[in-house]
Image: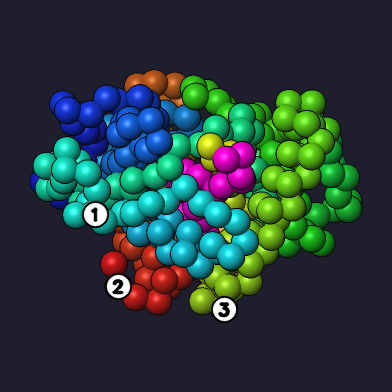
Amino acid sequence: MSAATLLQTSLSDLSLTRRGKVRDVYAVDDDRLLIVATDRISAFDCVLPTPIARKGEVLTALSQFWFDKLGHVVANHLLTSDVSQMPENIQRHSEVLARRSMLVRRADVFPVECVDRGYLVGSGWKDYLKTGEVCGHKLPENLQESAELPEPLFTPSTKAEEGHDENISEAQVRDIIGADATAQLRDTSLRLYSEARNYARERGIIIADTKFEFGLDKNGELVLVDEVLTPDSSRFWPADQYQPGRSQPSFDKQFVRDYLETLDWDKKPPAPAIPPEVAQATTERYVEAYKLLAGREL
């Protein structure tokens, strides 16, 4: 592992509240959290032992870009991603935290993930092949893999700390969080996806699908949380290479998944290491996605 990569943090003067597949989350005070995007990468619900250089940097910068760009749609939890503007006990760790950290407002996060799909791929494609439906949405017959859907779909899922998230219907979401909250999450996430998708298309990227998470702040207002429209939470395809009826080239971690599919691995921990050339190619895809979407170098 090079000095430029980070697999795990250990900040002795902050309380670690959660270590996710990619992010380490620390309590700052009663109102704020510190979210650190490491260079860990997961596939098939397993964290790989190989770090992806600059990954945490891309996830943080791209989330900041989208929080700024889509702030007119819904408020978000980001306070700053500039470590020099964070409390002193965080600044002491600036060498580790710079360019990969967000100071955010706490929120009461909804226990569902808002997945929005514009194309038939991934678990949606698998569900369609079995049932002709995706999360309760009946689709036309004889659609191809990666086909563009007639209109974007709200296809929520459960949130699993470990193992697979499960696709659920909108009716099931209503049973979990109520009808009003479900309608608000559906309408807000679809608007976010539609605006981002239209913007990205002009930049040469198809956002095939993405995942949003929402919460309520201490005033009960809806806020967008976690990461937003990154190569980890979305499928990014180069528009000039799009061809339905097959798996698409991508700017996301599908490249790693495709490599792992060539191995004799049962998709259970421990996950295998990936070769340096696969890790490097993944870094290049993530950085290129940022450059195309943000219109500037990272």
In three-dimensional space, the C-alpha distance between marks 2 and 1, rounded to whole angstroms, equals: 23 Å
Q: Residues within 10 Å of mark 3 (few under 14, many from 20)?
A: few
Say what secondary structure mark 3 lies in: helix
Identify the amino acid type marked 2.
Glu
**Picture residue at 23% right of the left edge, 29% below the top:** 14
Residue 234 forms part of the magenta stretch: yes
Residue 96 visible from this viewpoint: no
Q: Position of residue 252 (x, y in %)?
A: 45, 54
The answer to whether the residue labelled 1 contacts the one labelled 3, judged by CB atoms less than 8 Å apart, is no
Vertical arrangement, residue 281 with respect to residue 34, above or below: below
**Picture residue at 75% right of the left edge, 39% below the top:** 182
Q: Earlier in the sequence, mark 2 or mark 1?
A: 1
Q: Which residues are magenta?
A: 219-238
Identify the image quadrant of the N terminus.
Answer: top left
The answer to whether the residue labelled 3 contacts the one labelled 2, judged by CB atoms less than 8 Å apart, is no
Dot 2 corresponds to which residue? 297
Identify the amino acid type marked 3.
Glu
Vertical arrangement, residue 202 with respect to residue 105, above or below: below
In three-dimensional space, the C-alpha distance between marks 3 and 2, rounded to whole angstroms, equals: 18 Å
Dot 1 corresponds to which residue? 85
**Picture residue at 81% right of the left edge, 36% below the top:** 179
Q: Earlier in the sequence, mark 1 or mark 3?
A: 1
Dot 3 corresponds to which residue? 202
Residue 287 visible from this viewpoint: yes
